[in-house]
Structure formats: structure tokens, C-alpha cells
Image: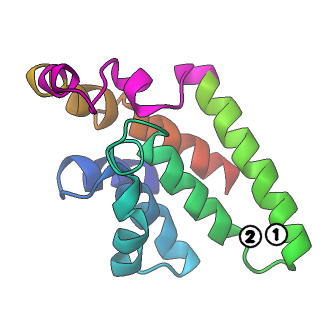
């Protein structure tokens, strides 16, 4: 299974949140073990601590990119990481327009009405975890950047 599919499976089937899934799927080749990936990704779900802000998949991808250039000297690592993060966001916006969880889901999980809609319409399952979901988009872009 490739890292793109693994990202989807980890989120959809194995109970990891969005950030944990992408860090786990991509981090292994960079020396990030599963336990560390889960710890690093824990606070980013639901748009950073379930605040409906920056997408957790994007947050996880940024963490992976921070590690991806770790073998360079710090000045080069910062430059390469910044370039990769900018490409990640630009390409993601081309696909999905938004980067905030509430905008991507079409409902705000910080409100009772938003949570009700998310649950009733299975928005996380349908928009994030599916074969045409946000997770796949982020994983594809991340794979192309690494």
C-alpha cells in the first residue's frame, strides 16, 4: 500500500485523526515512528484542537515537511521547508479553495448546529476520509513534494 492510500486507511479504518494519519503514513521513511507520529499529530485534529481552523491533514503535512529537510544545514532546511509548504498550500487551494476545517467541511464543529450537521451528514467521512477526499488530496501533494 502506498503512502497516499495508507493515509486514508489510517484515518478511515484505524482510528487515527487526520494529522496523525498523514504523519504516520509519511513519517516512517523519515525516522518518525508510529508512537511519535501519533503524539505529534494529536493536537491538530478538527482544525487544531477541534477549533475548526487549519485543516489537520495540512498541519500534519507541514510537520512531515519540517522533518523531510532535516539533513540539510539549518539555513537550507528553512528555505526548502518554506518553499515546500508554500507549494503544498498553493496546490491544495487550487484543488479545494479553502484551508480551514470549517470551510472544507461546510460546517463549523465549534457550534452545536455545526456538530449536528457534521454527524448527520457524515461530513468527515464523506469529505475527508474517502477515496476522493481531502486526505487523499493532501497525501498526493505531499508525495509529489518529497
Q: Quadrant of residue 33?
A: bottom left
The boundaries of the magenta stretch are: 94-117
Q: Name the residue beneath numbered marker 2.
A: 69
Kind of element beneath mark 2: loop
Residue 77 in view (yes/no): yes
Q: Quadrant of residue 35?
A: bottom left
Pick the quarter of the image with the N terminus.
bottom left
Label located before the other in sequence (1 or 2): 2
- Using a 10 Å C-alpha cutoff, classify the residue at mark 2 as few (fewer than 14 neighbours), some (14 to 19) or many (20 or more): some
Q: Name the residue beneath numbered marker 1.
A: 77
In the image, farthest residue toward the left = 120
Residue 1 in view (yes/no): no
Q: Quadrant of residue 111?
A: top left
The image position of residue 32, as x and y in percent, is 49, 78
Q: Is residue 108 one of those drawn in magenta?
A: yes
CA gap, disc 1 to disc 2? 5 Å
What residue is shown at x 37% (from left), y 30% (from top)? 133
> As displayed, is residue 95 above or below residue 124?
above
> Does the residue at mark 1 contact the one at mark 2 (Cβ under 8 Å)?
yes
Q: Is residue 4 one of those drawn in magenta?
A: no
The image position of residue 67, as x and y in percent, is 64, 71
Would you say 11 lies left or right of 15 here?
Answer: right
Amino acid at each position: 500500500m502506498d503512502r497516499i492510500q495508507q493515509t486514508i486507511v489510517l484515518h478511515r479504518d484505524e482510528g487515527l485523526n487526520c494529522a496523525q494519519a498523514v504523519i504516520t503514513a509519511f513519517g516512517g521513511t523519515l525516522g518518525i515512528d508510529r508512537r511519535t507520529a501519533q503524539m505529534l499529530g494529536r493536537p491538530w485534529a478538527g482544525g487544531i484542537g477541534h477549533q475548526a481552523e487549519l485543516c489537520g491533514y495540512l498541519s500534519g503535512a507541514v510537520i512531515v515537511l519540517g522533518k523531510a529537510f532535516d539533513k540539510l544545514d539549518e539555513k537550507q532546511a528553512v528555505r526548502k521547508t518554506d518553499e515546500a509548504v508554500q507549494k503544498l498550500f498553493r496546490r491544495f487551494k487550487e484543488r479545494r479553495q479553502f484551508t480551514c476545517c470549517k470551510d472544507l467541511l461546510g460546517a463549523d464543529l465549534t457550534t452545536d448546529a455545526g456538530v449536528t450537521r457534521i454527524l448527520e451528514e457524515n461530513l468527515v467521512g464523506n469529505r475527508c476520509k474517502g477515496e476522493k477526499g481531502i486526505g487523499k488530496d493532501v497525501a498526493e501533494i505531499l508525495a509529489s513534494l518529497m
